[in-house]
Amino acid sequence: MAVTPPSSLQRLHLIAIGGSIMHNLALALHRRGAHVTGSDDEIFEPAKSRLAAAGLLPAEEGWFAEKVTPDLDAVIVGMHARPDNPELLRAQELGLRVYSFPEFIYEASRDKQRVVIGGSHGKTSITSLILHVLRYHGRKFDYAVGAQLEGFDLMVQLTEDAPIIIIEGDEYLSSPIDRRPKFHLYQHHIGVISGISWDHINVFPTEEIYREQFKIFADMTPKAGTLIYDQNDEQVQLVTVPSNPDVKYIGYGPHEHVIRNGKTFLLNKKDEEVPVQVFGEHNLRNISAAKEVCKCLGIKGKDFYEALGSFKGAARRLELVREGEGSVVYKDFAHAPSKLKATATAFKKQYPQRKLVACLELHTFSSLNPAFLPQYAHTFDAPDVAVVYFNPHVLEHKRLPPLPPEAVAQAFQRPDLQVFTDSKLLAEFLHAQNWQGANLLMMSSGTFDGLDLAQLATEVTR
């Protein structure tokens, strides 16, 4: 059956249009001239304002089967929707073409060289690094990435003439009716596996099942394709055994560097120091991965380093909130055990003479699940003061059993761990700290239930 190219699809309806990546897709399609409609049962900022500015914000929240009409060219369904979503059921009843996000991106990039960045951690930063370098040097490229990046107003771009597309390859499920991981659908030419650390326990109930998804991804690397991987990650080593003589395997480790007065400098082949604005061993690995990808795309080493100097990092990935004379405040998206350990350790190593107060919000299904919590053992040892916060109402919303604070402290295996379930009490605790010669690191995929981080940062750094 002939495939209709997405570029010819002019009337599209997005189910769950408010998602972080889905609303970017909606805006990208709208910018390309397509007629876009959508629905969602809840839309938060910044998606709400961005959709409104483009005239794409649904008139009211909720699902309405009557929005799905026979004249639509296709429907794109986000993971937030459920299999019994009335709009999805209507689309199926009408026999309309229903795409998941990764299916649509693949169809839109069939004729491009596809670079897919996978991994439990680091994939957003690696993808962002590559985009920054390519843009710095005026290369034409399309992309799909989950985090906001400075200089890019949209995080999805689909054009007719770009020869390559850079895709952040999420391992989560593609859609409510397609249980395959997203990164299996992109069919990469160049693939990256940055690290493997069990996550998404609600979908992958064992570490072995989770790891198998990356093995499938590695094995999908085509003839004359390239697989770039973290050669020091034990889990990655299990799935990237160089077994296919037709595939090029490239291992990488942390980039050579020095740290001086809280600043990180890379060392190039001539042992020259290249200042960078990001830090931590995990970011030094991310830089190595991005450098290998850029090399495959024809970017020379000296040009890579030249572009790297102006890279400030992806939004919420070790993002500087405020800096004072003797204190800094950063926020980070870290929430999984491996990300938590890497970020906290890197931060302490970057500022060894300063006290580190670090606060983690348990917000995801995995992080709040009693069966998964033991994965956090000793991942939060680096900070001088370690704080964990969670909202009991989130447990109810996710239909998880109550979580006693003492069970959290026990899982982290840190007796002095401070555990809060009330955001006001958390704020009082942080405000009461002595911030002279101390740094603050706030880590969450949520918002600490509206904690005013800007005000807190002002107090810390005054």
Image (spheres, rainbow, N blue to C red):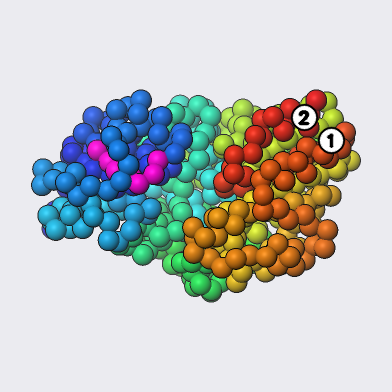
Residue 353 in percent (x, y) is at 89, 40
Which amino acid lies under the numbered mark 2 shown in the image of this protein?
A: Glu
Q: Which mark is residue 459?
A: 2
Q: Is residue 224 visible?
A: no
Residue 349 in percent (x, y) is at 80, 46
Decide if residue 90 is on the left or right side of residue 164.
left
Q: Earlier in the sequence, mark 1 or mark 2?
A: 1
Please identify the quadrant where the C terminus is shown: top right
Image position of 71 with respect to 456: above or below: below
In the depicted view, which residue is nearer to us: 44 or 301? 44
Q: Which mark is residue 435?
A: 1
Task: Identify the element where label 1 is drawn.
Answer: loop
Asked if the magenta segment contains residue 279, the reply would be no
- Residue shown at the point (60%, 60%) measured from the top left: 367
Residue 393 in percent (x, y) is at 55, 55
- Residue shown at the point (35%, 25%) measured from the top left: 53
In the depicted view, which residue is nearer to us: 43 or 280? 43
- Residue shown at the point (30%, 51%) measured from the top left: 77
- Residue shown at the point (72%, 41%) measured from the top left: 427
Asked if the magenta segment contains residue 38, the reply would be yes
Res 316 → quadrant: top right
Which stretch is magenta? 37-43
Cα distance in 3D space between marks 1 and 2: 8 Å
Res 23 → quadrant: top left
Contact between labelled residues 2 and 1, with CB atoms less than 8 Å apart: yes
Decide if residue 280 is on the left or right side of residue 67.
right
Q: Is residue 146 visible?
A: yes
Residue 189 in percent (x, y) is at 40, 53
